[in-house]
Amino acid sequence: MARSHEQFVEKQRFAFRARPGSIRLNGTVRIGWEAVSTATGDGVGGGSDILVLDDNGRTKIDYMFPGP
């Protein structure tokens, strides 16, 4: 996550926002997202992540799937 933050937020100045329809099932969460240019507000990409949570509800594993 830190590497993605450095590459996309700090260097390329993108913001990320969640798409509607996130789903949680026990210790797993599916989140859809889109990347937006902070300079123009235009959407520049998106995808979804599957998060596996630990016993405290924190992200243990993050599987990222870029795409529409």
Image: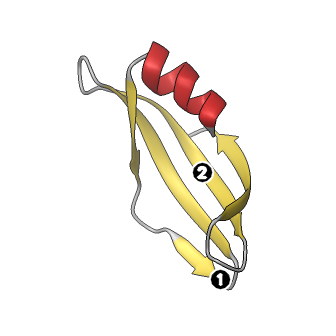
User: Residue type at mark 2?
Assistant: Ser
Q: Is residue 9 above or below residue 55?
A: above
Q: Residue at x 70, y 79 (%)?
A: 27
Q: Position of residue 1 (x, y in %)?
A: 63, 40
Task: Choose the circle earlier in sequence order: 2 or 1.
Answer: 1
Q: Nearer the viewer, residue 47 or 29?
A: 29
Q: Residue at x 55, y 24 (%)?
A: 6
User: Residue type at mark 1?
Assistant: Leu
Q: Position of residue 21 (x, y in %)?
A: 45, 68
Q: Position of residue 13 (x, y in %)?
A: 38, 20
Disc 2 and disc 1: Cα gap in Å? 16 Å
Q: Residue at x 69, y 45 (%)?
A: 64
Residue furthest left in the image: 40
Q: Position of residue 56 (x, y in %)?
A: 64, 77
> Which residue carries the number 1 mark?
25
Left or right: where 66 falls relative to 13: right
> Which residue carries the number 2 mark?
48
Question: Residue 40 falls in which quadrant of the image?
Answer: top left
Which quarter of the image is occupied by the C terminus?
Answer: top right
